[in-house]
Image: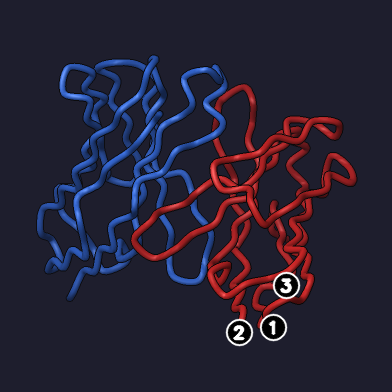
Amino acid sequence: GNSVTQMEGPVTLSEEAFLTINCTYTATGYPSLFWYVQYPGEGLQLLLKATKADDKGSNKGFEATYRKETTSFHLEKGSVQVSDSAVYFCALSDPQETSGSRLTFGEGTQLTVNP
Amino acid sequence: DADVTQTPRNRITKTGKRIMLECSQTKGHDRMYWYRQDPGLGLRLIYYSFDVKDINKGEISDGYSVSRQAQAKFSLSLESAIPNQTALYFCATSDFRTGRAFFGQGTRLTVV
């Protein structure tokens, strides 16, 4: 079946540090890939997505590139802020669902950014 | 107002009790989902519905049931709650055109 594996957390960084959160996946088809963010006390929000190989999703300074050859979708940000502190989830769509519904999630990575 | 609203936000119940979690949405989406979040396990799909007459089991449906009362409403029931159902529950909708999902703020359920 489909699966998503994220780097283990928690991750603690100082403000303006470089961030990488690793994500690899297993899927039988050609999934769409997503990063969702969960701020304290809130539900998940879409951060960025990529729908095919070599696509780069970007939003709010975060980027991730769909790498089919390494089945990866690592999240990066060049300079994190305290307000980026949250839990980040990598997810993939069900390849049988062309709309990208029925998401499979990774375990989530807690990021804390200190001033 | 939130696009996806869950009630209650927090609930403590006793083992063996029946409990219903409710979800309503104003996105106009046909597709709705219930997920469960446990620490270190990400989100796992309990049930999903692609329209009012369509209900499907997810990966962890045992011990749960759902009802899709209308396009905008999708409720999750625990017929006889047990302590290992203690978790954070999320309702979500999705846009079939883009695949983007919209989540409620979650219901924290504790079964004692």
Which chain contains the residue that carries disc 1? Answer: B
Q: CA distance from mark 1 to mark 3?
A: 16 Å
Q: In the drawing, does residue A46 fall left or right of residue B77?
A: left
Decide which of tag 2 and tag 3 comes sooner along the chain: 3
Say which residue label 2 marks: B112
Check if mark 2 and mark 1 are on a common chain: yes
Q: Quadrant of residue B58?
A: top right
| Chain B painted colour | red
Q: Crowding at label 3, few (<14), some or many (≥20) Cα neighbours within 10 Å?
A: some
The answer to whether marks 2 and 1 mark residues whose Cβ atoms lie closer than 8 Å is yes
Tell me the amino acid under the disc marked 2: Val
Q: Secondary structure at mark 1?
A: loop
Q: In the drawing, does residue A78 fall left or right of residue A26?
A: left
Q: Crowding at label 2, few (<14), some or many (≥20) Cα neighbours within 10 Å?
A: some
| Chain A painted colour | blue
Tell me the amino acid under the disc marked 3: Pro
Say which residue label 1 marks: B14
Q: In the drawing, does residue A81 fall left or right of residue B34?
A: left
Say which residue label 3 marks: B8
The image quadrant where one finds the N terminus of chain B is bottom right
Q: Position of residue A77 (x, y in %)?
A: 19, 47
Q: Nearer the viewer, residue B76 or A11?
A: B76
Q: Secondary structure at mark 2?
A: loop
